[in-house]
Amino acid sequence: MRIAQIAPLAESVPPKFYGGTERIVSYLTEELVAQGHDVTLFASGDSRTAAKLVPITTTALRLNPHVQDAVPHHMILLDEVRRRADEFDFLHFHIDVIHMPIVQGMLDRSLTTLHGRLDLPDLVPFYRAFPDHCLVSISDHQRLPMPPVNWGRTVYHGLPADLLPANIGGDKDYLAFLGRISPEKRPDRAIRIAMEAGMKLKIAAKIDNVDRAYWDREIAPLVEGNPQVEFVGEINEQQKADFLGNAAALLFPIDWPEPFGLVMIEAMSCATPVVAFRCGSVPEIIDHGVSGVIVDREEEAVDAVHRAVAMDRARVRAAFDARFTAERMAHDYVALYQDIIAASTATPGLPRPRAATPGLLIA
């Protein structure tokens, strides 16, 4: 198939540091190429891919100090996609909402994967106004806040099987926290859990400007002068294998409706068990008692840490191999591409129903 992958421009594909969406777009794109498809990637110019790259910007927007507004750059992206759309059998969007008006004439050969949280009030009237475009969720839980829309299926994220090798042997003497420093990720919980468990905690995380005050006020005082806690900072893909693989367990103490939680399967790939709070997608991703332990309260987590550390790490990796490889993810998407095209071919010219009340007005 001739497939277009349309990525956000905030980060390169793959990102140099943090960036879950762009990382998944990269894994999917490279696997589709490996499976023999003719893939074109619309992304920032500093992206690296075996596909044909259409560079929209010179560099990722987050790393460009001269960029003050991302919208104009994404308008350029949309225009480039619109002009070249007839070159492709299928168009796969990863840019949330801004492309919806231009794909209305391409509903028979396009879909959008929704990578973020969907419990925001402004999204309900939007998706009521565009109910026909095929949407893909990255967990079943992610769908819950949405009005009736055209769900294609849930496709769980996947990683290349050889990206983060299993680290099964040897002593593992610290707990890991990987992601962002933000209130919903709850690094404060991770620190308290590690201290109660009597284990060292290493925190590898970026601090966005919007979360700087939270770091200064809430987290820095818990880190500074605490011999049990080491703040590593933001790490890249090469550092991630050692960071996760050498950890006794990953702490995932989130306090928000996590749509997926890529770091959980990154840890599983390294054969590192996960201690996670029962929020969002967590019960769909973690096989309780096999790849990790799911808890509801902070006081449960200390015991859960000791249970996780004692888990069979080979089984943790096996759980990853069974469900979360990039090969499986790409096969799932190609099957959906083909289903959408086949449905359109079987019923050419069939009008697609529109919502009777688009719901454009917000009271």
Image (cartoon, rainbow, N blue to C red):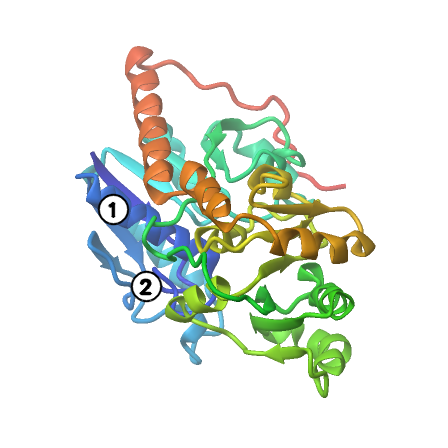
Q: SS class of the residue under badge 1?
A: helix
Residue that appears at 72% across and 76% down? 219
Quadrant in the picture for residue 90: top left
Query: Which residue is more in the foreground, 171 or 219?
Result: 171
Residue 210 in the image, given as x and y percentages of width and height: 64, 72
Query: Does residue 82 appear anywhere in the picture?
Result: no
Which residue is outermost to the front?
A: 170
- The reply to whether callout 1 and callout 2 are in contact (CB within 8 Å) is no
Could you tell me the amino acid type at mark 1?
A: Arg
Could you tell me the amino acid type at mark 2?
A: Ser
Per the image, the residue denoted by label 2 is 44
Q: Is residue 220 left or right of residue 241?
A: right
Residue 203 in the image, given as x and y percentages of width and height: 60, 72
Residue that appears at 70% across and 51% down? 256
Q: Earlier in the sequence, mark 1 or mark 2?
A: 2
Query: Which residue is more in the foreground, 314 or 72?
Result: 314
Determine whether 26 is above or below 188 in the image: above
Residue that appears at 30% across and 14% down? 348
Per the image, the residue denoted by label 1 is 83
How crowded pointer 1 is (Cα within 10 Å; few <14, some 14-19, many 20+) is rated as few
Q: SS class of the residue under badge 2?
A: loop
Query: Does residue 21 appear anywhere in the picture?
Result: yes
Query: Which residue is more in the foreground, 257 or 102?
Result: 257
Residue 78 in the image, given as x and y percentages of width and height: 35, 51
Quadrant in the picture for residue 237: bottom left
Quadrant in the picture for residue 73: bottom left
Q: In this view, does 126 lie to the left or right of 25?
A: right
